[in-house]
Every structure is written in structure tokens, then in C-alpha cells.
Amino acid sequence: MLDLNVFPSTFKWGTATAAYQIEGAAHEDGRGISIWDVFAYTPGNVKRGDSGDVACDHYHRYPEDLKLMRELGMNSYRLSLAWPRILPRGRGEVNLKGLDFYDRLIDEVLKNGIDPFVTLYHWDLPQALQQLGGWANRDTVSAFEEYTSVVVGLLGDRVKNWITHNEPWCAAFLGHGAGVHAPGLKDVGVSMQVAHHLLLSHGKAVQIIKNHNPEHKVGITLILGPSHAASDSPEDQAAAARHDAFLNTIYLDPLYGKGYPKVLFDHIPDLAPTVQDGDMETIATPTDFLGVNYYQRSILKHSEEGPFNFEGVRPPGPEFTFFDWEVYPQGLHEVLTRVHQDYAPKEIFITENGATFEDTLTEDGQVHDEQRRFYIERHLKAVQDAIQEGVPVQGYFAWSFLDNFEWAEGYEKRFGLVYVDYPTQNRYVKDSGKWYSQTVKKALGLVEV
Ligand code: IFM
């Protein structure tokens, strides 16, 4: 059973979103084009031809959205900034109207008594930088430094918690290896170089933020999950170990000063990234916390195909989300205890966790999403167990506050605690949102337990 007394009194209770997924206003007030605009406008890339052009229209509706967040009792909020709104060409000329939007947005967050956690990069690279090679080009690291300095200069008097990158695995591999995310490249070698540049830019950004104010807290958010072998055979065990390196330790190891995992790069030496002197030290610049996004585990068997020689096996179930991801809350506990034991981050925040199910809005404005409610409750229980075992988890951000643009899936997949009726842009709090709100209010002593 969930025992809210186990969660520290300083615990951050919130929800998470990302700029391209909710803001809309893609062509307003001088925002530059991002790689996701280009990717979404290219036929065949996103289901039904959806794009983030309008999304949840949060750009115009943010005051009412934040009022709702406050009414739900949240004490924190993880959001991201759109780099092309601030620097339309990636570097150089600053767009004052874009800066002004984030200035007002952060003031509104604070006005509602909510603590902002700001992610600098949630995948919307300015297209002008992509034209110069994007993250495969080492120069993009210095553009990210410039962007970080501009943002910290503007918001660093009010924002105290920073996340450099969201899920570099997705940006690097899904975007440059599998080609299912922007910019849609299919070159595994390039994806490894991109991973290195993302990590390098993370280290540089940590230094910029800490130079601005050493009291500020900085971390990075990784998508993590257990890689289990499909059998006891040495081949399947080795396949699972390679997958673990491909998904998890390729980021965790260098961030915590252990270099890139040998088990991966001994297997694909030709695809290893080019690393310059000092890079690994920069990547390992100490951080204050690790952000963990958890959705599912993977089960692997040996395969003769592909550079990594592993193949995913469908997990035994019995429960899957609308994305066909297995519901496996114990995997979150496994990730948390493993990260604590192997890397010992000072603090851990669950920066995303949630599920998509097929929601129906009833005529009286209800969404009875029992599965999502139960999903969140069981994952919170996994967090509770980890805390009881000494893992320093300091916050939980449900993904997501609102239904939103779910990348290549468009608007078909809904992850929100709040339902968005896209034609009217009306918001309806789902049953899961009402339950989470009550849980948070109880944890914060705002209602009787
Ligand atoms: O919607 C995404 C989010 O942008 C990054 N993490 C996973 C979520 C669900 O797929």
C-alpha cells in the first residue's frame, strides 16, 4: 500500500511537459523553425500528418493551465524551453518576444506557488543548426553553450533547478539511428557521435549554470529501463548486457566518470565516437541530481542481425499500454536501486513516468481512466519501496500534465492527467488526475488523510 509518510517532506510532486508537445504557436512572435517542424511536415513521418503547430495552445493558455495545476495541488512543474523561440537560428540574434514569453511563463509558475524545473533541450533543435550538421557537428555544442548562457541570464534569478537534456538516447538513437524521430537519419555511427556531443554539451551547460550560481541545482534526465535476458543462455545474457550498455550505461558511465562501456564499444569498435582530449572530464562534471524517466523494461535475445546483435522479445505481460509497452512497475524499483548502488547520484528525481491508454470523454466531461490511475499508484509504490531502502528520490513528475503531441504518434496517444479536447481546446481532469491530485494534497498536508 502507498504510505505517503515515507516520502520526504521536501518531496517535489508535479507533472512534466515539453515545449514542442504543448506550446503550439509554431509560427508566432519570431519563433524559428525546429527539426521537429521539418520532420512533422514531411509526409509519412507522423501519424495522420499531425504536427505541433497548435498542440495544446499552451502558448496562449498558460495562465489558465497553471491555475489548474495549482488547483490540483502540485508544488512543482517540469517544463522545457524551445531553443528556436529564443535563438531562431540557434545562435546569434536573440528573439526578444520569445524571451518575453518564457519570462512571463516562469513568473506565472511562481505566482501559483509552483517550483519550476526547466529542461533546456527536449529535442527541438533549431533547423538552422541542423543545416550545419546538427548534433553530429561538434560546433552545435558551442551553440548550446551560447543558448544556455542566454537562458540562464534571463531566468537564472528565478529558476533554481535545471535539466540540461531530456533523454539523449531518444535524441541520438531514435533521431539519427532508427530515423523515427527528427531529424530522421538512419546511421548508427552518426547516432553514437551525436550521443557524445549531447553529453559534452551537458557537461558544458552544467559548468555555465554553476558559474552563474553555485547554489542552483543541475542534472540531466535519462530514459532508463532494465535489460533482461530472454533465457539463461550465454548468448542471450550477452545480448542483454549489450542492450543495457546501448540504452543505459552509454550515458550513465561517462556521466559518473567511468568512460564509455567497453561491452558496447568492443562489439562495435568502428562505430565508437570521436572523443577529444578533456571531453570525458567535461562530461563527468559533477551534477546535483539525476533525472530518471521510466516507462518499461526490455527483454533481449541474441540475433545475427544488426550492429548490436540483440533483438527485443515481447515481455510476458499480462498488462500493456496503448503503446504496447508492458506495465512493469518493479522495473522502476530495479532502476532506482541499481543507479543508487552503481553511481550514487546525490539526489534522484523521477522526471517522467506515465502511460497512454485509450481515453473516452463522456458527455458530462469525465474520463474514467482507471488503468492510468492504477499505473501511477503502482509506480509510486515502487518509488516508496526504493526510498525505504535508502535511495534518495526527491521528486516525482507524472508524464504528462496535458494530453499532447506524442511525437511520431501525433495526437493519437494520450498521456495526460488532463484530457485535451483538441477541437475546442477545453481541458477535463481525468479520474487519474483527480486521484493524483488528492494523493499530492494528502502528502503535502493540504487535505485530511
Ligand atoms: O512524450 C514523451 C516525452 O517527450 C519523452 N519521454 C517519453 C514520453 C512518452 O513517450
Image: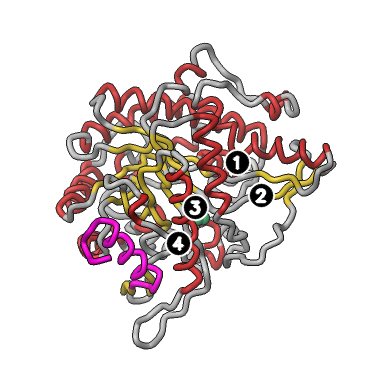
**Which residue type carries mark 3?**
Ala
Query: Quick check: 349 left or right of 318?
Result: left
First in sequence, mark 2 or 3: give its number. 2
Extent of the magenta region: 429-449
Cα distance in 3D space between marks 1 and 2: 16 Å
Cα distance in 3D space between marks 3 and 1: 28 Å
Which secondary structure class fits the magenta region best?
helix
Residue 124: x and y in percent read: 43, 45
Indicate yes or no: mark 1 CB to ligand 1 under 8 Å: no
Q: Residue at x 65, y 38 (%)?
A: 244
First in sequence, mark 2 or 4: give its number. 4
Q: Report the mark closest to the observer, 2 or 4.
A: 4
436 drawn magenta = yes
**Which residue type carries mark 2?**
Ser
Cα distance in 3D space between marks 2 and 4: 26 Å
**Label 4, on which residue?**
1
Q: Nearer the viewer, residue 204 or 385?
A: 385
Image quarter hosting the C terminus? bottom left
- The dot on residue 173 is 1
Crowdedness near tag 2: few (<14), some (14–19) or many (≥20) residues, C-alpha within 10 Å = many
Q: Report the mark closest to the observer, 1 or 4.
A: 4
First in sequence, mark 1 or 2: give its number. 1
- Tell me, yes or no, if residue 37 can be seen here: no
Crowdedness near tag 3: few (<14), some (14–19) or many (≥20) residues, C-alpha within 10 Å = many
**Label 2, on which residue?**
298
